[in-house]
Amino acid sequence: KNEVEQSPQNLTAQEGEFITINCSYSVGISALHWLQQHPGGGIVSLFMLSSGKKKHGRLIATINIQEKHSSLHITASHPRDSAVYICAAILRGSNYKLTFGKGTLLTVNP
Amino acid sequence: DTGVSQDPRHKITKRGQNVTFRCDPISEHNRLYWYRQTLGQGPEFLTYFQNEAQLEKSRLLSDRFSAERPKGSFSTLEIQRTEQGDSAMYLCASSLAWTSGTSTDTQYFGPGTRLTVL
């Protein structure tokens, strides 16, 4: 069992919908990243958080350390948000190595 | 462009050949990471450098794989005697750690090198 699990694996939405992608982890972590990967491979770091909530434009990331759970929300989704969203954690005891979830493929239709 | 760059972007090779990939990190970044991503999966950690020192290698990195960062700047990843199972996207990332042991430095990823072994 992967130490970092994401759900759903695939998500299709209509433009304008509110999107939620979930990430859960089974061990203690130091920090958690949300990453975006477009077709072709390039990965962009969206957020890094170790507690609470962060917001950037239409993107919001939250983390609950006690429940070992994080969510990525996209408000007013747009077709250009279509991408793979990956959750990656720095497990406690490893001060640099990212352990990745399998990713969530988001498709936003116009 | 001052981001992380990787070369080549695509490589097609025949089984048994050797290949070498290059990663140029963001110039002041002291940490450099290599990851491998197969189709439909999240990336997996391969190895990590702090300056020129290779501090950790994953068990995924068999003895056919070698990575170097000779001057603490660019890095190369070489795969000898390639196998079809080596086909994947090879991602490089870099970060700047202000103090040793910090876990909160953001990693910046390159575009990746897609390897296809025929």
Image (cartoon, rainbow, N blue to C red):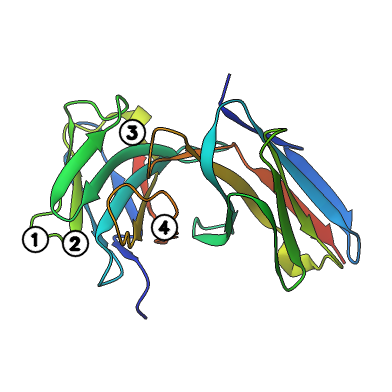
Q: Residue furthest left?
A: B70
Badge 4 marks a residue whose secondary structure is loop
Upstream in the sequence, badge 1 or badge 3? 1
Residue A68 position by quadrant? top right
Q: Quadrant of the N terminus of chain B?
A: bottom left
**What residue would you read off at disc 4?**
B105
Distance, label 1 to label 3, CA atoms, is 27 Å
Dot 4, crowdedness within 10 Å: few (<14), some or many (≥20)? some
Q: Is residue B102 left or right of residue A47?
A: left
At label 1, the amino acid type is Lys
Dot 1, crowdedness within 10 Å: few (<14), some or many (≥20)? few
**What residue would you read off at disc 2?**
B74
Upstream in the sequence, badge 4 or badge 3? 3
Residue A74 position by quadrant? bottom right
Badge 1 marks a residue whose secondary structure is loop
Q: Do tags 1 and 3 sit on the same chain?
A: yes
x then y, percent, for residue B89:
41, 46
x then y, percent, for residue B64:
17, 30
At label 3, the amino acid type is Asp
At label 2, the amino acid type is Phe
x then y, percent, for residue B35:
37, 43
Q: Do tags 1 and 4 sit on the same chain?
A: yes
**What residue would you read off at disc 3?**
B86
> Which chain contains the residue that carries disc 3?
B
Residue at position x 37%, y 72% in the image: B3
Total residue callouts: 4
